Each structure stands twice: as structure tokens, then as C-alpha cells.
């Protein structure tokens, strides 16, 4: 048996799978990092312990632990290196801590990289050799799979497609640079923008309770109801995402660009079809026809599936 | 013995190498495609024939022919597919024609791809696993080498870094899209721009004979002499190139981005150092420090070296 753990900025997800990879049980819960890395690691281990107990996995039967966390991290060493979204985490030897707590070897991977591998594997048999995965949760993570292998760049510095520029000299990004995709399409940045511009009278404000409480999901829901303000905001969001997709398409021409979180939630009509249309306007027809723009194939299960793939590397 | 042939839009280059890869003789000449593919192929074969005769290679000793041509082309089939820079060339079975004319098997590759491989090989032993090569001649060609292999994208559609956007809704590119790097930094596009803006009184106009005859090399020469207009134009050019370099650096984080033609001619002070400075402003310090921006290591010999690498695949 293996356990997969996804450590997010606002949630933890756990999954247990057997040796043949069948997902036996999973659990997801909201989580606010405490600001103390040791306390957070204890909470993470306790959550995994609890799910393993519920799934009836005795300590001796656990073969491997896979952990996904936001970068930067040193995957080979199993060490998290102070991600901006995990306050109080400096250099945290997460693999060693979890291995000791749960009694099995652990492996660590950047969350977006592992999710890209999971999305690639979910399309086995479809002739997908090259896949790029973009997740727009708090930030914009990305993973590049070429020929079934992660393409990490020199010293693992590549694959940072959330920091491709979509506006020259644009908004300041959390990373310190300007105009990054994340500064426009990342959940945190988009939410800040929405709270500045959402009219109190809009459907999104009504769904949120007030304009100052609007989150991306309220805009998606309002757009689905046909609200003009919400549709315009989603079109603006699509416009920035499409610029990054165009850069990915002409440079790598992957078989698939898979989009998670916001794009997956917004779906075909509000997001994927408009993105495909915009891509056709920005890149050669042969490339736009060849590169498939798809929602995540794994949806809600993606973080746990990704962590379980990482667990295969442990021990 | 092998022969390498580079078919450019305005020149032909030929080289002969022995079995161990030592370049024995090379020849380059200006060339204007006739508008008739058969006549052009005859001229190409005659040029190769002449160099082989000068090098004293009898017909029976030629083991392979390598040809580089501008895309689009079908490398596996050895067929050129109507490149915009070779008027009158529809679907031309260049490998078959040259194999028949010269009596040895032939292999074909996109010029920028082959040049990327040659630049990668020129850095053997330097720990360069990932290299991106950009050539700014008439257009902007590019090749991506990852782990010693060309990364071509699905159906060979990738690697088109000349068509990464450097200006949203910018100048119309020869490819039909807007704002591509090639529409600003490609030799043909830059020359059109220069002929519009060069003052008759400028040093570049004096070097060219008149403002209407200015070519990129006149601006580079004038900038080297300290001419303010030429320096400003090169800075503008660097600005657009740096945007593409930033996108390449964050997405692929290659060990080296090698730059040919205009950047190679302009050199360290006018081009490479300013590009590195601009890259530091646009991407994370760790990435800007890690990704080396270099001029082509092979200079003038590059097209012939590239074609000779392709010749290794023939027969």
C-alpha cells in the first residue's frame, strides 16, 4: 500500500492506493498553515495516519509515501525550501519527517510537476507524447512532460510557465517580476483584481454576499448564469491565459495543454472553447489544430493521484 | 567522405568532411533562387560537385550528403515543402534529387534545428544538456536540444521561437500572425523598419550609401563607431529579443541560449551584455544567473557544420 499527500496553501489531500495503483480511499480537508513548520508537519502526518487507519492499513504494510508541495523544493533531497505560500517554512526535510512519523520511505515532488505526470498518465493510449499542465489555484503552477518524462530545466529551474510574461511591464507579480501570467490569472491575483472592480450590484457580489468578498468561483458561477460583468471578467482572464498558451504552443507544440482548477471549473463554454478560439487567432492554424486544449482529466482526484505517482518512487 | 550543403535564401554553403568529422574544405557563395525549383536543385548539385572535385573526392568515396533548408519540410521523407524564402519551390524531393546527382544517400533537416545540434555538439564536455539556438537572419529560426536530442514538438511543429509574441497585437509578421519576434528582430523585418526610420544624416546611412539602402550590418557597424541613432536602434532590437529570451528562460531554463547572425556580429558589448542585463530585469535572479546567453560558437562555419551533422544520418 502507498499513501499520497498533497500539501496545498489552503488544503491537505490524502489518498491510499494498493500496489496495483487502485485508489482505495481519499480525504481532503481545508487547512490553514500555522506559521510553524514543525506543527504543520505534525498535522500532515496525523492526517495521513488517520486515513491509513480508516483504510485498515497496518504500519508494516505501508511501502511508500509520496508528497507534493509547492516549490521551491529540492526533490532529490526531499526538502521543501520556504515556499511563499507556506509561511514559517524555511528549509524543511519533509520526506525525513514523514518517513519517521509513518514508518515508510518518502519521495517529494513539486505539485505542478507531479500533476503534469498524472495528467499524462491519465491519457495513456491516446498517443500523447508531450503534455503541458497548468494549474491556476493560488498561484499558477506548471509541469512539462516530454516523451513521458518531466522536463525540469537546468537545476530544476524550468517549467515556470506561470511566470511567462502576458503583459510587458504589467502588474507586479508575487515573484517580484512584472506582467507574469500568475499576476493576472492566478487565483490570488485575480481575486484581488475582482475585489477592486466588482460592482456591488453584480450577480457575483450577490453570490459572495458582498463585492469585497468575491472569489473567482463566484465569478464563474455568475458567468454561468449569464451575468454580463462576470462574462467580461472571464473573457479578460481567458485573454491573458491565451497569451501563455500561444507561447507554449509555438515553442513546444505539445499534444495536449491540460488546464486545472479555475479553467476546469469554468468548463467548456466559458473557458476552453474561448481559449481555443483565441489560440487560433494567435498561432498558425496547423499548430492551433494540433495542440489540444483540455480540462484536467482527473478533476478533484488530481492532487491525490499525483502524490500517489510520486509515492511509486519512494523506497 | 561526407558533404554538407546549406541552402539559404540568399546564399549556398558547402563543406566536405572526412569520416572522423574533420572539415577538409568549405565554400560559400551568394545565391539568388531562380524561381524554378529544378534549376535551383541543379545549381545546388553543381556547387556540391565542384567542391567535391576540388577536394579530390571521387564519386565512389562519398558516403553521405547532408542538406539543411528553411522550413517547412518533411525531414523523414527528405522533402522541402514550399518555404516562403524559396520562391517556386512547392513539394521538392531534395534528398532524392541530390542523391541521384551526387551518387550517395542524402538526409534533410530544418536549418535552425541542425544548427542547434551543431552548437550543442560544439560545447561537448561543458555540461550543456539543454541548448536553445536562435538565428536572426532573414527570418528567426530556432532549434531546441534537450538531453542531446532535438525537441521538435508534435508533428515537428514546435521550436518556432521566432513566432513567440514580443508585442501584443504588434506588427504583422510574414507568417500571418501579429507581434512575433521575427516581425521585429528578423533581418528582413528589421531592415524594412530601418529604411523607414534611418535619418539621411546618420552614420548608418553614410555606411550604406543612403538611408534607403541601410541593412542591419550597417547599423551594427555604425553602433560600433558610437553612433547614437544606431545604438538606440540596437537597444530597441535587444529589447524585443530579450522578451523572447525571458520566455525561453522561464519555460525551459536551458543551460545555454546561443545566438547567431545579427547577435553574433554585434557581439559582446552591443548585444550579449545588454541582453543579459535585460534578462536579469525580466526573470528570477537564479534563472538569469543559470542560463548562459552566448554567441554562436561556430560563427561562419555553423551552416556547413550543421549540414555535415545531418550527413551522418544519411546512408
Image (tube, coloured by chain):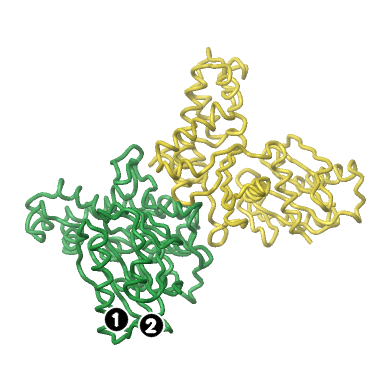
Chain colours: A green, B yellow
Q: Which residue is drawn at 15% across and 49% down?
A: A195
> Can you say whether A107 is above or below B55 in the image?
below
Q: x, y (%) of residue B134? A: 57, 43
Q: Give neighbour class at mark 1: few <14, some 14-19, many 20+ (Cα, 10 Å).
A: many
**Residue indicated by mark 1:** A52
> Can you say whether A86 is above or below B32 in the image?
below
Q: x, y (%) of residue A135? A: 33, 60
The answer to whether B283 appears left or right of B79 in the picture is left
Q: Which residue is drawn at 39% across and 51% down?
A: A244
Q: x, y (%) of residue A84? A: 29, 51
Q: Are marks 2 and 1 in contact (CB under 8 Å)?
A: yes
The answer to whether B307 appears left or right of A274 in the picture is right
State which chain disc 1 sits on.
Answer: A
> Can you say whether B48 is above or below A295 in the image?
above
**Residue indicated by mark 2:** A1
Of residue B273 and residue B198, the one placed in the foreground of this image is B273
Circle 1 SS class: helix
Of residue B252 and residue B196, the one placed in the foreground of this image is B252
Q: Residue at x 58, y 25 (%)?
A: B220
Q: Which residue is drawn at 54% across and 39% down?
A: B293
Of residue A93 and residue B12, the one placed in the foreground of this image is A93
Circle 2 SS class: loop
Q: Can residue B8 be seen in this view?
A: yes
Amino acid at each position: 500500500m502507498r499513501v499520497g499527500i498533497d500539501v496545498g496553501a489552503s488544503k491537505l489531500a490524502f489518498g491510499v492506493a494498493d500496489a496495483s495503483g487502485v485508489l482505495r480511499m481519499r480525504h481532503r480537508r481545508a487547512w490553514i498553515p500555522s506559521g510553524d513548520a514543525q506543527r504543520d508537519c505534525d498535522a500532515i502526518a496525523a492526517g495521513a495516519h488517520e486515513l491509513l487507519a480508516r483504510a485498515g492499513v497496518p504500519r508494516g504494510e505501508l511501502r511508500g509515501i509520496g508528497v507534493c508541495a509547492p516549490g521551491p523544493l529540492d526533490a532529490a533531497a526531499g526538502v521543501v525550501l520556504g515556499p511563499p505560500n507556506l509561511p514559517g517554512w524555511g528549509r524543511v526535510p519533509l520526506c525525513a519527517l514523514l518517513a519517521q512519523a509513518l514508518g515508510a520511505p518518502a519521495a517529494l515532488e513539486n505539485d505542478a510537476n507531479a500533476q503534469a505526470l498524472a495528467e499524462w498518465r491519465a491519457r495513456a493510449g491516446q498517443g500523447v507524447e508531450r503534455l503541458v499542465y497548468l494549474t491556476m489555484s493560488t498561484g499558477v503552477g506548471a509541469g512539462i512532460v516530454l516523451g513521458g518524462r518531466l522536463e525540469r530545466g537546468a537545476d530544476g529551474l524550468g517549467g515556470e510557465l506561470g511566470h511567462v510574461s502576458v503583459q510587458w511591464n504589467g502588474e507586479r507579480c508575487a515573484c517580484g517580476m512584472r506582467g507574469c501570467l500568475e499576476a493576472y490569472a492566478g487565483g490570488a491575483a485575480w481575486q484581488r483584481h475582482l475585489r477592486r472592480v466588482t460592482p456591488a450590484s453584480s450577480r457575483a457580489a450577490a453570490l459572495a454576499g458582498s463585492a469585497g468578498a468575491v472569489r473567482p468561483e463566484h465569478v464563474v458561477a455568475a458567468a454561468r448564469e449569464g451575468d454580463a460583468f462576470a462574462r467580461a471578467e472571464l473573457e479578460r482572464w481567458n485573454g491573458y491565459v491565451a497569451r501563455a498558451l500561444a507561447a507554449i504552443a509555438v515553442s513546444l507544440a505539445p499534444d495536449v495543454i491540460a488546464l486545472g482548477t479555475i479553467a476546469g471549473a469554468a468548463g467548456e463554454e466559458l473557458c476552453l472553447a474561448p481559449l481555443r478560439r483565441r489560440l487560433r487567432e494567435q498561432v498558425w492554424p496547423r499548430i492551433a489544430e494540433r495542440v489540444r486544449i483540455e480540462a484536467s482529466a482527473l478533476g478533484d482526484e488530481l492532487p491525490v493521484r499525483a502524490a500517489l505517482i510520486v509515492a511509486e518512487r519512494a523506497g
